[in-house]
Amino acid sequence: MKPTDPLAEHFRIDSIHKKALSRLRIETIEDLLLHLPKRYEDIANIQSVGGLSLGEDAVVYGQIGGLKSRKAWKSRRPIAEGWVEDGSARMKVMWFNQPYLAKMLTNGMYVKLSGKVTGSEGKLYLANPEVEKLDSLPIDRHDSIFKDTEKLDETLYPVYPETKGVTSKWFFHTVKKCFDKGILDELSDPIPEAILKKYNLPELTVALQWIHTPKKAEHTESARKRFAFEEVFYIQTQKARERATVESAACYQFTTDGVEEFISRFPFTLTGSQQSAIDAILEDFNGKHAMSRLLEGDVGSGKTAVAATTAYAVATSRPDAGKDWGNLQVAYMAPTEILAKQHFESFIEYFHHLPIQVGLITGSGCMKFPSKVDPTKPTKISKAQLLKWVKNGEIPILIGTHALIYKSVEFKHLAHVIIDEQHRFGTNQRKALAKKDARMPHLLSMTATPIPRTLALTVYGDLDITLLEEMPSGRKPIITDIVTPEKQKDMYEHVRSQLDEGRQAYVICPRIDEPDPDKATALRLKSVKAEAKRLKETEFKEYRIGILHGKMTPKEKDDVMKQFADHEIDVLVATSVVEVGVNVPNATNIIIEGAERFGLSQLHQLRGRVIRGTHQPYCFAVTDSKSDKTKERLKALTSAKNGFELAEYDLAFRGSGELYGAKQSGLTDLGMEALKNIKLVEAARTEAYALVESDPELEQHPRIRERLLSVEESLHME
């Protein structure tokens, strides 16, 4: 048996198993060994139903059946009842005042029940137990869960990520068979021994035994730390190589004269953070390597002004030293048409006094500023004409959506790429944008999404990071209130008073439509369409209400946003589609329904919609959750100073899986958990950069080079 052998060579894999394993991207023996447990059950503490006694707090595993609901004979209290069986005995189970459980659970279902043994001798039952549904029991029924447990070496039973067609139990037994066949003797550790010793990490074979068949909890922790380090280390190594590629490529070098005069025309004074960011970027422009920088700042912190200043520096520079004609070019990519058009309008404001042409390309059309007919306004032009002018260098600044990276778009001298909320923009995409030009464009990636430091260091490890930590003067801090059902009347009265003063409001709902009644679940979330109708009939009768959601066409969205911006709509009921890029300074109130359904970072971005103007902004996070944990989490919205603080709180409190970018990062759940450990991330980063510096092509580390191919695939790099 070799690590690269297909599983089917050594185990009988039927078609259902094969499809299930394929979904989990498991094909080889090595893939199986690296499919790690997500948690462990301590089977030493499992109790048998036949051994329970009156008054005991019990935790049992088994199958349930006989489910039905009825009313108590005397009190008429509703009851759900059934039985649980584990192979040793069967016991009655009763849930008082929870008759719905008889329908929510299914006969034959595997469960873990935690409750008190009640009743009388000979008539024992489990009262109101907590229920955890299981895909299978911790150990096969024909194995002894309850007999000779003291003889088992392992009492920690691993629980693996599953999918339909393959169970956690199958993974456990198959991994053990691989161990029995001597697979551990065939493995070589890709991580250098010196690094393992430096950080006291177990070598690969030991780590695999400890994580799949642990004898102690400390073993699992040590093994998980090793694999978390390894995962972050691979990504950091990939980032180090990308950085080295960028730094070895030629780039445009140019002077940045005239920037101070450009800034002096702004109708506001730059914050210290904005000035520092501009200084750092201009220094990069004058350096020998292409810039790779992430500009991170809260909504309204002034990222667009920084971007415009850098665009000015590039667009007024010449392609070649000593020549006094031609322009270097800037590509500015936005995630949506709404945002691309908004940036186009902003750049017109910044550049209207200069002889610099600005173009816009989106899926629905192209525009250019200034128009020959009216130099104060933009004009629509054909795509062919715009592309011709971009190709010959006549348009120095081109703003657009992903349409910018189409093959038909060619620049003459692309020196600078600005990306808004598109962080997975790799080195190869920069080269693709520059096309025939051998020089690497400078890259400025921008985000309003609060990113914890560990995530930024890992996923965006090839970028220098600049923070905009100040808000422009005149912006008032948002007053945020957590609204429970009894406070909703006061909330609506406040919003009506604001509407009476001429302000506008957003109402955010988690879903677009009401669910199909036949498929309705216990989870009732407000929908855009139904809530807009309700508000028009009740709370906001005299006001104009509009709706906005992701199923609308780009033109429909643009029309609604224009109506809202022109104050033809007073209250906009929308999904979180308004999270990015909508700018209506007169909108000062936002109601977020089902706030517990959103992450803190997303809630923070949503409320950022109402800090665009100088009026006092208000945010109402509405929840009917009775969970203390939920209330505590939402309370952080009212106390955190900025989005960065909230992001760190979300990481510590809610879990890394909720973070923005987690699904796109290429990290597994274990890797994301590692992000709670800043020392581990910094250690992995340090070792990765040192490794690449000493061995750029990884010729001395072929196993690491092989693994990076899979990292690239998981990061969707082209």
Image (tube, helix red, strand yellow):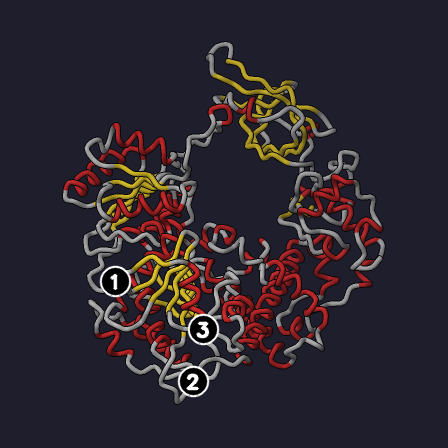
**The furthest residue to the bottom:** 322
Dot 3 or dot 2: first in sequence order is: 2
| Along the viewing direction, whichever of 477 and 293 lies nearer the viewer | 293
Report the residue at 70% width, 41% height from top.
Answer: 167
Quadrant in the rendering for residue 66: top right
Report the residue at 68% width, 51% height from top.
Answer: 25
Residue carrying label 2: 320
Residue 579 placed where, x, y %?
Answer: 37, 50
Residue 510 placed where, x, y %?
Answer: 40, 39
Residue 340 placed where, x, y %?
Answer: 37, 57
The span from disc 3 to disc 2 (Cα, nearest Å) is 13 Å
Residue 667 placed where, x, y %?
Answer: 58, 58
Dot 3 or dot 1: first in sequence order is: 1
Q: In the visual, does 364 lie left or right of 717? A: left
| Along the viewing direction, whichever of 162 and 149 lies nearer the viewer | 162
Foreground label between 3 and 1? 1
Residue 335 vs 192, above or below: the answer is above
Residue 261 vs 50, above or below: the answer is below
The span from disc 3 to disc 1 (Cα, nearest Å) is 28 Å
Dot 2 or dot 1: first in sequence order is: 2
Which disc number belongs to residue 373?
A: 1
Foreground label between 2 and 1? 1
Dot 3, crowdedness within 10 Å: few (<14), some or many (≥20)? many
The N terminus appears in which quarter of the rendering? Answer: bottom right
Q: The residue under label 2 is which amino acid type? A: Asp
Q: In the visual, does 483 lie left or right of 683? A: left
Q: The residue under label 1 is which amino acid type? A: Val
Q: Which type of secondary structure does the marked residue at label 2 adopt?
A: loop
The span from disc 2 to disc 1 (Cα, nearest Å) is 32 Å
